């Protein structure tokens, strides 16, 4: 048990880290390009924030939160998602003072006590973007466009955008009443979860993955017949803006997302690669959340995506990523008595920004050469008795095996000219 990570967690090992660097850099680059600034909130919040923010009827709040008490008996919860904390920070720091439209993004670990299954973890990483302050559909279009731009920059293909409207305070209650009536005589065929949803929020029945429920859902009334004029116009304009941007989408009236706070626009980005669990990100408008969490009425829209799932898709699609170039120079010695000089040399090389390594295990020269080979070092500097007496090192080119002796004082200039030559040779 001691040397085992907790159930549902995983380590990101050095062999995978380049994917994370690549993805994180693209997220920052693209979102800054769209004018979003990063915010970092704590990993835990008061439990009430999520109960109020995400909704007491959601699976997240009912079954999946990591909740604990601090020493004073206050209830805290590891954040299961990023939007409620961002909105909390927006209200707490009165961020709208600087700009009536606040555009933020975040990256970080989220925590949900789910049944571990393929691609789902109890600690997982998400990024998200939020635009708080505008009721206009043009900002919905921007959120969608910025999100897609990230996937595009990563190089992912085979993605599609699903779009829906889930209505507002005006029209949704009417649609919910229609749904209740529709499901009334079909309740016996619904799954136990959906029976509960029938009472609390029948909209959630629409995204039940169970076959028995999907059969019934297929023929249910469409929300588009019940949207109020405001919601219908919002949706129409959003479609116009997406068309203008050349963004292709499919309208899916069954798309409701797992969180209660969405209003009007709801959308998902789907990958054809991932089988049944195929959403690689999703979002929507949440016009009442700021109010729900104690602020003034402030319309907002956002997007979030799990990063593990994106990386999984990148690997499946064999996306080429830049990888760490590794060690360039290895400094080898024939005897521990040269360690002091070797340490000085390796330190100077590193100071010049050239990745260098040295033997820390007192290995033989032969073993050090094998190690240098394994590290794929371009050059090995060898410091032995003969070199020591001449104040020189032997520099060995590991690619063509040529070697020569150079003065220790000239190592840096020599290496720099070698790497400069290589750089220019590449381009
Ligand atoms: Zn409406
Ligand atoms: Zn169901």
Image (cartoon, rainbow, N blue to C red):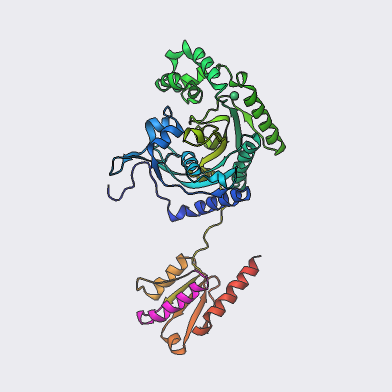
Q: Position of residue 35 (x, y in %)?
A: 61, 48
Is residue 397 found inside the magenta-colored segment of the image? Answer: no
Residue found farthest to the top: 185
Say whether residue 158 is left or right of residue 384: right
Quadrant of the image containing the C terminus: bottom right
Q: Is residue 388 above or below residue 324?
A: below
Q: Residue at x 50, y 12 (%)?
A: 181
In the image, the segment drawn in magenta is 333-355
Instruction: Residue at 32%, 40% (x, y): give it.
Output: 74
Residue at (47, 54) in percent of width and height: 17
Q: Is residue 232 above or below residue 325?
A: above
How many numbered marks, from 0 up? 0
| Residue 381 picture location, percent across and down | 48, 77
Q: Is residue 237 visible?
A: yes
Q: Is residue 230 above or below residue 295?
A: above
Q: Is residue 407 visible?
A: no
Foreground of the two, 260 or 9: 260
Q: Residue 246, relative to residue 38: is it above or below?
A: above
Residue 280 vs residue 3: left or right? right
The quadrant holding residue 159 is top right
Q: At 56% across and 79% down in the image, what residue appears?
A: 414
Q: Main secondary structure of the magenta part?
A: helix
Based on the picture, tell me whether residue 348 belongs to the magenta stretch.
yes
Identify the residue at the far right of this view: 244
Ligand 2 positioned in quadrant: top left
């Amino acid at each position: 048990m001691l040397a085992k990570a907790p159930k549902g967690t995983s380590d990101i090992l050095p062999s995978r880290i380049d994917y994370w660097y690549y993805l994180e850099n693209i997220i920052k680059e693209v979102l800054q390009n769209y004018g979003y600034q990063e915010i970092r909130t704590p990993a835990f919040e008061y439990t009430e924030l999520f109960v109020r923010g995400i909704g007491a009827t959601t699976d997240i709040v009912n079954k999946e939160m990591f909740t604990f008490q601090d020493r004073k008996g206050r209830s805290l919860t590891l954040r299961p998602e990023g939007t409620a904390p961002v909105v909390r920070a927006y209200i707490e720091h009165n961020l709208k003072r600087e700009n009536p439209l606040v555009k933020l993004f975040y990256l970080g670990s989220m925590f949900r006590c789910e049944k571990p299954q393929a691609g789902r973890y109890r600690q997982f990483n998400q990024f998200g973007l939020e635009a708080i302050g505008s009721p206009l559909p043009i900002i919905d279009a921007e959120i969608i466009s910025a999100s897609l731009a990230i996937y595009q920059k990563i190089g992912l293909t085979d993605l599609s955008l699903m779009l829906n409207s889930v209505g507002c305070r005006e029209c949704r209650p009417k649609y919910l009443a229609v749904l209740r009536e529709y499901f009334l005589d079909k309740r016996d065929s619904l799954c136990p979860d959906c029976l509960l949803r029938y009472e609390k929020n029948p909209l959630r029945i629409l995204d039940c993955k169970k076959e028995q429920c999907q059969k019934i859902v297929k023929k249910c009334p469409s929300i588009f017949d019940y949207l109020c004029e405001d919601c219908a116009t919002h949706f129409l304009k959003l479609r116009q803006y997406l068309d203008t941007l050349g963004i292709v989408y499919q309208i899916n009236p069954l798309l409701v997302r797992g969180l209660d706070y969405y209003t009007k626009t709801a959308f998902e980005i789907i990958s054809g690669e991932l089988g049944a669990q195929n959403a690689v990100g999703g979002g929507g408008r949440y016009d009442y959340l700021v109010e729900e969490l104690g602020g003034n009425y402030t319309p907002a829209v956002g997007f979030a995506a799990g990063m593990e799932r994106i990386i999984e898709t990148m690997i499946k699609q064999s996306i080429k990523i830049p990888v760490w170039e590794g060690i360039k120079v290895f400094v080898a010695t024939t005897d521990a008595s040269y360690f002091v000089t070797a340490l000085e040399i390796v330190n100077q090389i590193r100071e010049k920004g050239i990745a260098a390594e040295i033997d820390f295990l007192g290995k033989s020269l032969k073993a050090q050469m094998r190690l240098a080979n394994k590290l794929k070092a371009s050059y090995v500097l060898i410091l032995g008795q003969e070199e020591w007496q001449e104040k020189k090192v032997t520099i060995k080119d590991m690619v063509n095996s040529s070697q020569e002796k150079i003065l220790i004082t000239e190592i840096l200039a020599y290496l720099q000219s070698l790497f400069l030559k290589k750089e220019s040779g590449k381009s």
